[in-house]
Image: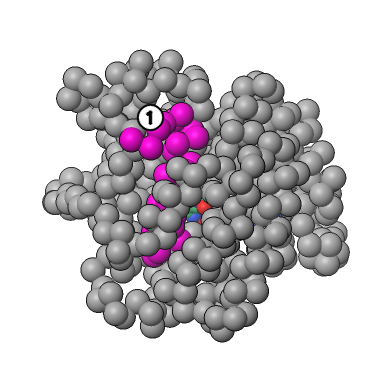
């Protein structure tokens, strides 16, 4: 029986994780559910899953939750220290890291430092803390498994040796010439370029293939998501810039590929449903049922592939450039993008302003390298303020 904490339980990945748990009740138990503010959703989840602990980041939300689930034997907590002791508890085997954005970094790192099995959906944590994160996984003997569908696909196409050396593997020594990171291109792959300035939040979050939370949906529309994934892939697979290529694949049937030096290309395919990579991470190295329909090739019919157009997707180019500059630049781009996407969703700036905010913030990338989490958090904070000022000026 694996005892799990779900960080971001009220979100899209949280729901998919709980769905997989429901289908495998003799193998997984929900130890704790963690969310930010959504009390209604948390009440429903507590009634259904009866976790030992329900943690709300908002103290107000925790207060309300306490009143509403008094009839259940679920302990309600709030506060950063309480969250840390929850993910590091000896009663916990694995942690699903699915808080959205930089807010997920510290609890995820706490789980890593407690040597847990960490199922990583929160790509922003790795984009920010990169080397420090990967080193902590090795130092504290944590098991890191990639939930992001592309990274999970790549992981499944690696040799066992490379899988066991996540973050430190030697791709060339494994005979790998290239990682092919696929992405659908989102809802605006073929839209008239001039129309992008007038895109509404509702249009941007309507992804053609995947159902996801609002932030990652906007990131998919700008392809910043692929940029963050490019950075994520570089850390997870210890890959150089030249070892990763982004490939547009509108059907989202192939979830990424690995090309070997003998000409073989291995791919992982499936319906676009996050329960597949989540179930893979939960059960690795075995397999469990996820509830995902088997892929019907006769329905799929055709698969197509294109080179990304950086003119259409400048956020992708920007994130790749940041990745080449280093961890300070990726921390800045990530923080800027979070503020820009929030402002776009709130109707304060236009869709094409997102890249302007991100670009503007690259001005404050420090020259000297940052080597502690505290420094990274300080840069993240500084960048948010800098981005917010520029957003005020834009709106
Ligand atoms: P979502 O918006 O649906 O859910 C976000 C969750 O994070 C919610 O439970 C919310 O309560 C919690 N949260 C938000 N702010 C918080 C804070 N300050 N402190 C603590 N908790 C907070 O997002 P999602 O789509 O489930 O994505 C979650 C993460 O997984 C993101 O990092 C995303 O990039 C990654 N991811 C998602 C998908 C997907 O299909 N949805 C795929 C790959 C990776
Ligand atoms: Mg992905």
Instruction: Give x and y (percent) for residue 279.
Output: 47, 37
Residue 191 visible in this rendered orientation of the protein: yes
The reply, left or right, for residue 287 in relation to residue 29 is left
* x 59%, y 53%: residue: 365
Main SS of residues in magenta: helix
Residue 266: image quadrant is top left
Where 55 sits versus 194, above or below?
A: above
Where 140 sits versus 65, above or below?
A: above
Which of 49/117 is in front? Answer: 117
Of helix, strand and loop, which one carries label 1? helix
Instruction: Give x and y (percent) for residue 45.
Output: 66, 56
User: Is residue 340 in the magenta section?
Assistant: no
Where 363 sits versus 161, above or below?
A: below
Residue 210 visible in this rendered orientation of the protein: no
* x 77%, y 52%: residue: 55
The answer to whether mark 1 is within 8 Å of ligand 2 is: no
The reply, left or right, for residue 273 in relation to residue 373 is left
Quadrant of the rendering where the N terminus is positioned: top right
CA neighbours of label 1 inside 10 A, class few (<14), some (14 to 19), many (20+): many
Instruction: Give x and y (percent) for residue 227.
Output: 42, 51
The reply, left or right, for residue 142 in relation to residue 150 is right
* x 84%, y 52%: residue: 79
Which of 355/169 is in front? Answer: 355
Circle count: 1
The reply, left or right, for residue 32 in relation to residue 357 is right
Instruction: Give x and y (percent) for residue 270.
Output: 31, 43
Which of 80/341 is in front? Answer: 341
* x 67%, y 21%: residue: 139
Quadrant of the rendering where the C terminus is positioned: bottom right
Q: Which residues are magenta?
A: 219-242
Residue on which the image places disc 1: 156
User: Is residue 224 in the magenta section?
Assistant: yes
């Amino acid at each position: 029986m694996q005892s799990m904490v779900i960080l971001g339980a009220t979100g899209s990945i949280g729901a998919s994780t709980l769905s997989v748990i429901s289908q495998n009740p003799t193998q997984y138990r929900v130890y704790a559910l963690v969310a930010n503010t959504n009390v209604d959703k948390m009440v429903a989840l507590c009634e259904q899953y009866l976790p030992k602990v329900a943690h709300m980041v908002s103290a107000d939300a925790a207060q309300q939750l306490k009143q509403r689930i008094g009839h259940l034997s679920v302990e309600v907590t709030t506060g950063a220290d309480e969250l840390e002791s929850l993910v590091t508890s000896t009663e916990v085997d694995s942690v699903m890291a699915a808080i959205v954005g930089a807010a997920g970094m510290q609890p995820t790192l706490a789980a890593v430092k407690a040597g847990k099995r960490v199922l990583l959906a929160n790509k922003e944590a790795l984009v920010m803390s990169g080397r420090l994160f990967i080193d902590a996984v090795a130092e504290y003997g944590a098991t890191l498994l990639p939930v992001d569908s592309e990274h999970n696909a790549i992981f499944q196409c690696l040799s066992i040796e490379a899988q066991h050396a996540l973050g430190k593997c030697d791709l060339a020594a494994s005979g790998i010439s290239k990682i092919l990171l696929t992405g659908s291109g989102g809802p605006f792959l073929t839209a008239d370029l001039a129309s992008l300035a007038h895109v509404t939040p509702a249009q941007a979050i309507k992804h053609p293939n995947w159902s996801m939370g609002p932030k990652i949906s906007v990131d998919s529309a700008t392809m910043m998501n692929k940029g963050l994934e490019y950075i994520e892939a570089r850390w997870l697979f210890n890959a150089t810039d030249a070892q990763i290529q982004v490939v547009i694949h509108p059907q989202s049937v192939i979830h990424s590929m690995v090309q070997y030096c003998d000409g073989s290309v291995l791919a992982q395919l499936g319906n676009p449903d996050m329960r597949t990579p989540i179930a893979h991470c939960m059960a690795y190295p075995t397999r469990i049922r996820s509830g995902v329909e088997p892929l019907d090739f006769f329905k799929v019919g055709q698969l197509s592939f294109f080179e990304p157009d950086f003119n259409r997707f400048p956020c992708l180019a920007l994130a790749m450039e940041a990745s080449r500059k280093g961890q300070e630049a990726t921390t800045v781009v990530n923080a800027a993008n979070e503020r820009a996407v929030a402002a776009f969703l709130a109707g304060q700036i236009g869709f094409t302003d997102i890249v302007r905010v991100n670009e503007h913030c690259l001005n404050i990338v420090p020259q000297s390298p940052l080597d502690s989490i505290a420094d990274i958090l300080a840069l993240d904070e500084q960048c948010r303020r800098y981005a917010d000022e520029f957003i005020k000026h834009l709106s």
